[in-house]
Image (cartoon, rainbow, N blue to C red):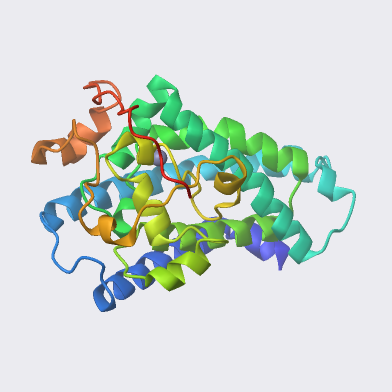
Amino acid sequence: MEALLQNNEDVVLFVGMVSALVLAAILEALIPRQPERADINRRWANNIGLTALNQVNITFFSGAVALVLAWWGGEEKIGLLRQVDLGLVPSLLLAILVFEFVAYWFHRALHTIPWLWRIHAVHHCDTELDFTTTYRNHPLELYVNAPLTIPVILVFGFPIVTVLLYQLLKTSISVLAHSNLRLSPAADRILRLVLVTPNFHRLHHCSERRFTDSNYSAAFPVFDYLFGTARNRPYAEHATMAIGLDSFRAPRDGRLDRLLLMPFVWRPVPARDASIQPEAA
Ligand SMILES: [Zn+2]
């Protein structure tokens, strides 16, 4: 079973991602937050273009990475967990904590280090939010992230099944968190204690910088609560708040070629409004 998964890791992840996107598309059609959205055809064409480009990158890159991990980690029995058999559930819980911790601080770095923000702004300048925004990332983000994530996989030596399950969980939650899905305030209040909900993540895409620099988690919000970066705002305000970045609102800014060039041809984002204090989570 483990060998089968290891040999078909790319296929399992790809099928998982497509299934999550299809599920989110169906849910958005059934219970949309905003039924009519401007410019959807143009946005979707560019977002899906970037998603496809990232997928090609991931396929080539993860193939190379898998070879390195198999050679160095598997054969040499490198990794703390290769010495003990934790069992699936404990190792999955540990993987969630470890990978989410790394992802949380990486995401904070993307927002605070200027050259990383230029790359990450491609994700944030989408003027609406739906399931197609999930993989609207600049391809460079993958290569900047890898030197952080790969050593973690090697040091801990998580079993391949654990890593796959975590990635499938994270993909599904992250796609739903980006989706234009209506969730009642009551359901949101309960779910956001353990999962990143559409409302929780929507605030991260709000163009007011005090909210953009909050709610960093992609799937499990534990470290936003722990490090005091979880924010909330009244449910009614979500309907009117602006999504995206004020410097990149022109239709041409969303074009695929512009998105790919954005980190190199940069227009500064207006200074953050320091006079407004964030609300309590
Ligand atoms: Zn972000």
The residue located at (29%, 56%) in the rendering is 132
- Name the image quarter holding the N terminus: bottom right
- Residue 255 shows in the view: no
**In terms of depth relative to the viewer, which is nearer, 149 or 225?**
225
Quadrant of the image where one finds ligand 1: top left
The residue located at (35%, 68%) in the rendering is 24
Residue 34 placement, left or right of 137: left
Q: Position of residue 156 (x, y in %)?
A: 76, 43
The residue located at (43%, 72%) in the rendering is 186
Q: Position of residue 246 (x, y in %)?
A: 19, 34
Locate residue 254: give its quadrant.
Answer: top left
Q: Position of residue 281 (x, y in %)?
A: 48, 50
The residue located at (37%, 70%) in the rendering is 183
**In terms of depth relative to the viewer, which is nearer, 232 or 200?**
232
Q: Residue furthest right?
A: 83
**In terms of depth relative to the viewer, which is nearer, 241 or 80?**
241
Q: Position of residue 30 (x, y in %)?
A: 27, 78
- Residue 111 shows in the view: yes
Residue 146 placement, left or right of 210: right
